[in-house]
Amino acid sequence: MSNVENLSPQIIRQVTRELHELTSEPPEGIKVLLNDENVADIQALIEGPAGTPYAGGVFKIRLCLGKDFPQGPPKAFFLTKIFHPNVATNGEICVNSLKKDWKSDLGIKHILLTIKCLLIVPNAESALNEEAGKLLLEHYDDYSQRAKMMTEIHALSLKGAKSSVESSSEGPTAKKHAGDKKLGTEKKKVVKDKIRRLRRL
């Protein structure tokens, strides 16, 4: 995994500067979560692009910078479960710019934008999730339905948590909490039903 002690002070400064630029001027649909204790362990939230099965979801990803960064590419993972040809079951992301096409001057912003583009245009040729790759090529509607359902189960809850964190600063009332509890119970029921349907697919 990433360890800030493995990076030179110059690289640490460069990465820190880029991360602060990304938080002050974030690319559309991407939010970097700063970790001042370890800049080599980068986490970000990526919104599912409109017009894709991932629309409406928020996906948490992690970039782990190795000791050879930036000569060697970082490892990238989805921390939010996702059904995608280029994402393994452990969350590892397979994309050419993090493998054979890596260049040391690409930077963190380029990597995050590449991962977002992967949600728009999956590459079935280099599939880590063979089932998703096969469905994408042979039965797109089934692939889309499965990806959408996984998004609703795993990525919408993250979006809900994010918005509730934002609204909690406004001082919610006890009445609102009671309503949230009822909604939470209903949502759990819907999610359980979706998981049952997903297992049948």
Image: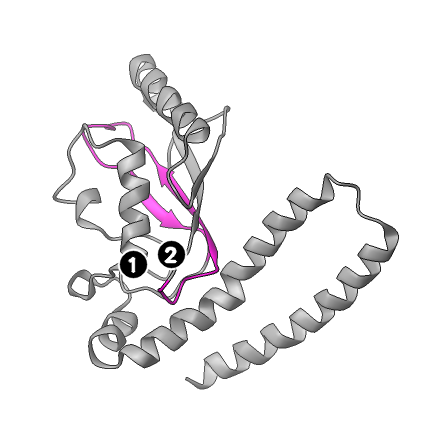
Where residue 12 sits in the image (x, y, percent)? Answer: 35, 19
Under circle 1, the secondary element is helix
Q: Which residues are magenta?
A: 51-80
Give residue 120's mark.
1
**Quarter of the view holding residue 81:** bottom left
Q: Is residue 117 left or right of residue 150?
A: left
Residues marked 1 and 2 touching at CB (< 8 Å) = yes
Q: Is residue 53 left or right of residue 56?
A: left
Where residue 100 sits in the image (x, y, percent)? Answer: 12, 44
Where residue 95 sits in the image (x, y, percent)? Answer: 22, 51
| Cα separation between marks 1 and 2 | 7 Å
The secondary structure that dominates the magenta segment is: loop
In the depicted view, which residue is nearer to us: 104 or 6? 104
Residue 102, placed above or below residue 175: above
How many circles with numbers are drawn on the protein?
A: 2
**What's the residue at 26%, 81% (across, down)?**
139
User: Around disc 1, counting alpha carbons within 10 Å, would you say few (fewer than 14), some (14 to 19), or many (20 or more)?
Assistant: some
Q: Quadrant of the N terminus?
A: top left
Give residue 49's mark.
2
